[in-house]
Amino acid sequence: MTRRISAVALVVPDYDAAIAFYVGTLGFDLLTDEDQGGGKRWVTVSPGDGTALLLARAANDRQTAAIGTQTGGRVGFFLQTDDFARDHSAMLAAGVTFDEAPRIEPYGTVAVWRDPFGNRWDLIGAGPPA
């Protein structure tokens, strides 16, 4: 039996703003953008590795309050790259906000950044640094 997590929901304030950031700024692929009726859409994006984020527009006050705090203030998402310097520079140039300078850890180079909605991410350069 083969199992995998195919998507993780990320509550956002607006579909188009989220697509603009994840696809336009970060270069993710737009996998689906399907009208579900009633203003609801099924929107998934991917960094290109088969995983997906389901961009879920907040539909009520409780969901709106969760935007950017879905993981209780912790880093909740991890973007791994084969070239940390390239992607870190590109993200800085695109205006992505980093909470810290890159640091070396046993598993590689890492820096915490935020999407425009307040979600905390790690950019991780895989493997020990050169």
Image (cartoon, rainbow, N blue to C red):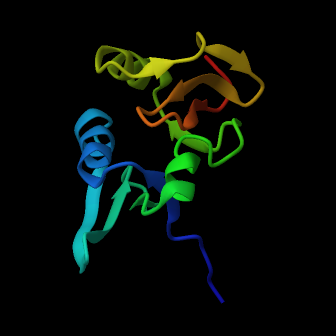
Q: Position of residue 87 (x, y in %)?
A: 40, 25
Q: Nearer the viewer, residue 41 or 124?
A: 41
Q: Position of residue 40 (x, y in %)?
A: 30, 71
Q: Position of residue 51 (x, y in %)?
A: 47, 61
Q: Identify which residue is drawn at 44% across, 61% down.
A: 52
Q: Identify which residue is drawn at 63% across, 22% down.
A: 109
Q: Quadrant of residue 78?
A: top right
Q: Is residue 12 left or right of residue 109?
A: left
Q: Nearer the viewer, residue 75 or 72?
A: 72
Q: Identify which residue is drawn at 23% across, 50% down.
A: 16
Q: Identify which residue is drawn at 55% across, 40% down.
A: 68
Q: Nearer the viewer, residue 67 or 19?
A: 67
Q: Residue furthest top?
A: 101
User: Looking at the figure, which quarter contains the N terminus?
Assistant: bottom right
Q: Residue furthest bottom?
A: 1
The number of numbered discs placed on residues in the rendered structure image is 0
Q: Nearer the viewer, residue 12 or 28?
A: 12
User: Looking at the figure, which quarter contains the C terminus?
Assistant: top right
Residue 4 against residue 43 in the figure, above or below = below
Q: Is residue 48 left or right of residue 75?
A: left
Q: Position of residue 12 (x, y in %)?
A: 42, 50
Q: Residue furthest right?
A: 106
Q: Quadrant of residue 125?
A: top right
Q: Quadrant of residue 94?
A: top left
